[in-house]
Amino acid sequence: MAISEAVERYRRFGAPQTHGRVADFEVAIDARWLHTGLGTYTYNVISRLKQFKPTWSVKAITNRKSADQLAPWCDKIRILDTPIYTLREQWQVACAARGADLLHVPHYNIPLFHRGKLVVTIHDLIHLIDDRKNVGTAARTYASIMLNAAARKADHIITVSQFSKTQIIERLAVDPSKISVIPNGVAPIFRPPNGAELDLGPGNTPEPYLLYVGNLKPHKNLMRLVSAFAIFRNRTKLDWKLLIVGPGGGNESKQLVLHGADLGISDSLFFQKNVAHEVLPGLYRKSQFLILPSLIEGFGLSVVEAMACGTPVVCSNAASLPEVAEGAARYFNPLDVEDIASALEDVALSEELRTRLRHNGLKRVGQFSWDESARQHSEVFERVLQN
């Protein structure tokens, strides 16, 4: 829907907590994408921001299907059904943010026509640093243009790990003082099991199973994971399954299915594409352990979600993952299929190791809080607004 045809829709759920005062500032947030890790991040910041800045007015720029989900946390909703990564969003998001004192864009697709204060979150530089021909020329060119523009135009940059901050400094030539590292959090629904919660999850879940949560993009390294899983099954003779949860289809899932067939493990691979957020904790809790074989990660949200559920974590030693998991994971070289298989075998065959990983994970996950993340976001916004 074009901006010229749109009507700004104000949805108020009780009067804003201004205590008789006019709102100090209005912050607009681009919230048109509430799926995958990016959507989890955006929703959790928006839903907590007024806890720390009750006199601010929060305006969400979002699409029709997400408006009701965001409305309870916002003073204003601006409906904008323009997809991300399009030319139209360049001027339409800028128009939708007009009147706000600050615009926060939770991804690098900033509106170049925006003329006000701007904070952008750059989660990672995957499209620039993945040199394994996993990123098409068009996508790499777009990402390069937009990331460099975001680095220059933003008043401040937020990222989610020291690894990503280092990459931004080196690849985009950004002054370190312009970047704040604010780790992702973990929602309260991700918690260890108790008696009643052991049955969470869809009834057709294969058991026992190893769990992967994330998209199927090449940098997630799932082809090597499937190869390693085949070796693991052959060595251990364990009749365990591999459950792959997350968005992805078409050629990506077809390749994994064909690869599994070539290896003779078709009956051990399971895919669940559309999993409701409230079901995901049950899938973590019922799994033997989480496996994340990524070549590149800006953060690795599934790692902290699994740890919060008391689920052991087995992950690659690449990018931000050692920083996020610290001593709470069994690591492997993601480029070495044999090393991945050995890690799976070690954790599967050692109850003592699984117990230690659970304990360390529950201890480590206390460092990640969406409330704390939102508080730090509000402080960044305030510094930008006051400069």
Image (cartoon, grey):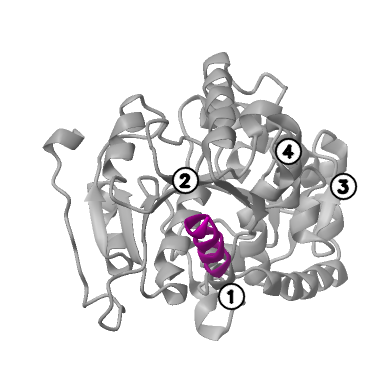
Residue that carries the numbered disc 2 in the rendered image? 118
328 or 172: nearer the viewer: 172
Circle count: 4
Crowding around mark 1 (Cα neighbors within 10 Å: few <14, some 14 to 19, many 20+) is many
Residue that carries the numbered disc 3 in the rendered image? 342
Of the residues shown, which amino acid type is indicated by label 3?
A: Ser
Residue that carries the numbered disc 4 in the rendered image? 169
- Residue 323, quarter of picture: bottom right
Mark 4 vs 3, N-terminal side: 4
> Percent x, y for residue 52?
47, 74
Quarter containing the N terminus: top left
20 or 38: nearer the viewer: 20
Q: Which of marks 2 and 1 is in front?
A: 2
Do the numbered discs 3 and 2 sit on residues whose CB atoms are within 8 Å? no
Secondary structure, mark 3, is helix
Q: In this view, does 267 lie above or below 72?
A: above
Mark 3 vs 2, N-terminal side: 2
Q: Is residue 375 magenta?
A: yes
Do the numbered discs 1 and 4 sit on residues whose CB atoms are within 8 Å? no
Residue that carries the numbered disc 1 in the rendered image? 191
